[in-house]
């Protein structure tokens, strides 16, 4: 028998609160002006709460030229007797932000593109797609409250998000250049990669390789280094070092690079026919790598400046193993953490929350949802590696997850779980304004009332 006196779950209460907030905006007397946004063609449909189309319009214009179309929709709604109107669209690219600013006198709500895609078939049981249909479907989903109120970021948070996107692109560029150099040298001059344990982390190796490739040029003839001699080569490397951010060298690595070029057997290893072109292309890739790393350093410095402006640097770096840059990369994707009702909501936004797979007495295997922001998952994943070496609470959790007898996790699964814990701790310290405390994070220290919410999330 059901128990009518059973209290609502936390999830029930939060869902009810979310629906109440939406219903306060999308009332039962509100008309919906839905836009299907594109580059040069904008289709809008005005509907009532039963998703009956009251008016349609197609505009050949850019998104920032929609002021007249929005005014038309508001006038049509007023003529139909509606006292309020909400503007709706999919959050595609930058256009929804432009529409949000234009429709300031109304309220913008957004509908996830995934919902629109799946609702198309439910409309007439086909895969029919048109801009006019999409506008009507967006309006229908809004009347069903299958929408959300988008974040209106403050300028500092908006700047941090743009800097985070720039940093992510530069990390990708640097990784691509490094992998390209590795592939090219493995093909044309494999001995060069054996000169250092971690070549791309060694400034001495980078300077020495740069000198070799500059000297060799487009000929691919490494014998020129042997004719040059050690003394002349070492002098050239010393002149090159400042361009890589240092004046001190690791003589063993530089000597190993010289030997790799001067020793005929090692210099001639690789595909001879590819050597000249591959080494020339390697020099270009090294230049790309240096440029990406230099630009990334500039962007990271600016991201830390934004954290300082927000007054968060001290708080986020109180978490052992989390650097200011790592925290900034995460916050660039989350936006202001205070907009999330709980730390669990932030983890869900990252797609790191467990996915239920149960029915009746059946309990299947579960994984993470994989929804949300992929770049946020990536930023949290990258931050975990340093955190596990320096954060005792997260290290203990990782050891427990990988060492317990029941439901033992693999190393990758445990790192994913720790990434979620790191996001919870970050949410806790920011929303409560309380520096990280290992006892609170472990759940063993009595908490004051104002810290209870944050500490429970961090535990």
Image: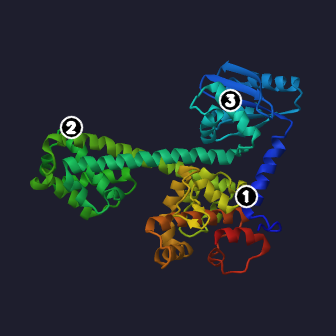
Query: How far apart are the two marked residues, 1 and 2, measured between alpha carbons?
Result: 60 Å
Q: Which residue is mark 2?
A: 218
Mark 3 near mark 2, Cβ–Cβ under 8 Å?
no
Q: Nearer the viewer, residue 64 or 235?
A: 64
Q: Residue 46: percent from the left, percent from the top?
A: 77, 27
The answer to whether residue 61 is left or right of residue 252 is right
Write the residue at 62% across / 22% down: 41
Q: Is residue 144 above or below residue 182?
A: above
Residue 434 seen in this snapshot: no
Mark 3, residues whose alpha carbon is within 10 Å: few (<14), some, or many (≥20)?
many
Q: How many marks?
A: 3
Foreground tag (3 vs 2): 3
Q: Which quadrant is the C terminus positioned in?
A: bottom right
Write the residue at 51% across / 54% down: 378
Q: Hey, which quadrant is residue 91 in on the image? A: top right
Mark 1 near mark 3, Cβ–Cβ under 8 Å?
no
Q: Which residue is mark 3?
A: 135
SS label for mark 2: loop
SS label for mark 3: helix
Mark 2, residues whose alpha carbon is within 10 Å: few (<14), some, or many (≥20)?
some
Q: Nearer the viewer, residue 221 or 422?
A: 422
Q: Which residue is mark 1?
A: 341
Q: Residue 359: percent from the left, percent from the top?
A: 60, 62
């Amino acid at each position: 028998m059901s128990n009518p006196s059973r209290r609502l779950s936390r999830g029930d209460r939060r869902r009810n609160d979310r629906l109440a907030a939406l219903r306060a905006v999308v009332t039962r007397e509100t008309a919906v002006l839905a836009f299907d946004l594109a580059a040069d063609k904008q289709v809008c449909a005005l509907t009532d709460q039963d998703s009956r189309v009251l008016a349609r319009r197609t505009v050949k214009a850019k998104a920032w030229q929609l002021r007249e179309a929005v005014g038309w929709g508001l006038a049509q709604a007023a003529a139909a007797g509606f006292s309020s109107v909400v503007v709706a669209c999919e959050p595609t690219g930058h256009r929804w932000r432009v529409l949000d600013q234009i429709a300031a006198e109304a309220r913008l709500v957004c509908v996830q593109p995934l919902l629109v895609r799946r609702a198309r078939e439910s409309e007439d049981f086909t895969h029919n797609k048109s801009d006019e249909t999409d506008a009507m479907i967006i309006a229908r989903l809004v009347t069903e409250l299958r929408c959300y109120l988008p974040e209106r970021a403050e300028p500092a948070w908006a700047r941090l998000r743009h800097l985070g996107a720039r940093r992510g692109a530069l990390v990708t560029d640097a990784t691509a250049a490094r992998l390209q150099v590795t592939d090219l040298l493995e093909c044309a001059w494999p001995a060069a990669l054996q000169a250092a344990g971690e070549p791309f982390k060694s400034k001495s190796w980078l300077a020495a390789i740069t000198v070799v490739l500059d000297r060799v040029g487009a000929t691919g003839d490494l014998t020129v280094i042997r004719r040059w001699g050690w003394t002349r080569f070492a002098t050239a490397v010393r002149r090159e070092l400042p361009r890589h951010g240092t004046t001190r060298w690791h003589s063993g690595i530089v000597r190993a690079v010289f030997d790799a070029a001067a020793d005929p057997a090692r210099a001639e290893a690789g595909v001879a026919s590819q050597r000249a072109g591959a080494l020339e292309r390697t020099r270009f890739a090294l230049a790309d790598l240096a440029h990406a790393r230099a630009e990334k350093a500039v962007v990271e410095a600016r991201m830390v400046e934004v954290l300082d402006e927000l007054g968060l640097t001290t708080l986020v770096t109180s978490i052992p193993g989390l650097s200011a840059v790592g925290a900034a990369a995460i916050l660039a994707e989350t936006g202001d953490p205070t907009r999330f009702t709980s730390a669990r909501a932030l983890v869900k936004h990252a797609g790191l929350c467990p996915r239920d797979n149960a029915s009746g007495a059946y309990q299947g295997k579960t994984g993470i949802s994989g929804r949300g922001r992929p770049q946020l998952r990536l930023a949290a994943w990258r931050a975990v590696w340093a955190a596990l070496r320096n954060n005792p609470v997260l290290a203990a959790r990782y050891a427990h997850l990988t060492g317990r007898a029941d439901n033992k996790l693999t190393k990758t699964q445990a790192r994913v779980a720790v990434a979620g814990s790191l996001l919870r701790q970050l949410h806790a310290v920011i929303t409560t304004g309380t520096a990280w405390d290992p006892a609170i994070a472990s759940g063993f220290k009595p908490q004051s009332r104002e810290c209870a919410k944050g500490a429970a999330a961090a535990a």
